[in-house]
Amino acid sequence: MADRVSPRIANVVAALPLTGSMRVLEIGCGPGVAARLVSQKLKTGMILAIDRSGKAVAAAIAGSEEEIATGKLAFRCVAIEDFVLQPGEQKFELAFAMRVGALDGRHPELEARALGRLKAALAPGAVLIVDNAAPLSAADLPDFP
């Protein structure tokens, strides 16, 4: 499926510090446009894209069959404040979010919990990029409350 990519999403993905073997977590993936772009830049890495909306995840899966088949893209329906690694799942080296209320100041009551969940899911030295804020190192995130 050919995506119509907004300049905002294209710019965010272009600015991500991606390497071809990286494990990436996208928070709040919506219909999966950014996740598909990232998956196309990965050689041996993979991206897990999550969203709290089952409807959004279903649309993302429906529009990503080709990328999912490569093994470089997966989706999961979960809110970031409830996210946990599955048994045996490796930690992520990069996480990013665009317009996610639990991370961009719109829902401060969820932010500490979301950041704690992220810290547990990110590898040492990993980076979190949220909208136009300065990147955060995983080491600087608070522990899960």
Image (cartoon, grey):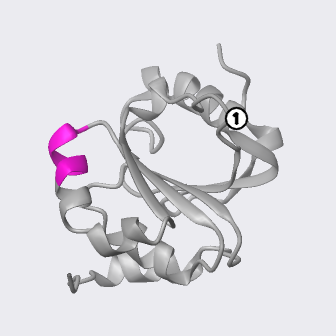
**Which of the 4 image quadrants contains residue 46?**
bottom right
Q: The magenta stretch spans which residues?
A: 53-58
Q: Pick the quarter of the image with the N terminus.
A: bottom left
Residue 127 location (% of width, % of height): 71, 55
Residue 102 location (% of width, % of height): 42, 35
Residue 11 location (% of width, % of height): 45, 82
Helix, strand or loop at mark 1: helix
Please state which of residues 105 and 124 is positioned toward the viewer in this rendering. 124
Q: Is residue 86 left or right of residue 36?
A: right
Q: Is residue 20 left or right of residue 55?
A: right
The answer to if 65 sits in the magenta stretch is no
Given the current orientation, which residue lies at the most extreme front position? 69
Q: Is residue 58 left or right of residue 15?
A: left
Which residue lies at the image location 30% right of the left edge and 36% below the top edge? Answer: 52
| Circle 1 residue | 119
Relative to 58, say whether 78 is above or below: above
Which residue lies at the image location 41% right of the left edge and 66% below the top edge? Answer: 35
Q: Is residue 112 left or right of residue 61?
A: right
> How many marks on residues?
1
Which residue type carries mark 1? Answer: Lys
Q: Pick the quarter of the image with the C terminus.
A: top right
Prevalent SS, magenta region: helix
**Which of the 4 image quadrants contains residue 115?**
top right
Which residue lies at the image location 40% right of the left edge and 82% below the top edge? Answer: 10
Please state which of residues 102 and 40 is positioned toward the viewer in this rendering. 40
Which residue lies at the image location 38% right of the left edge and 65% below the top edge? Answer: 68
Mark 1 burial class by Cα count in 10 Å: few <14, some 14-19, many 20+ = many
Relative to 133, say whether 36 is above or below: below
Relative to 39, say whether 71 is above or below: above
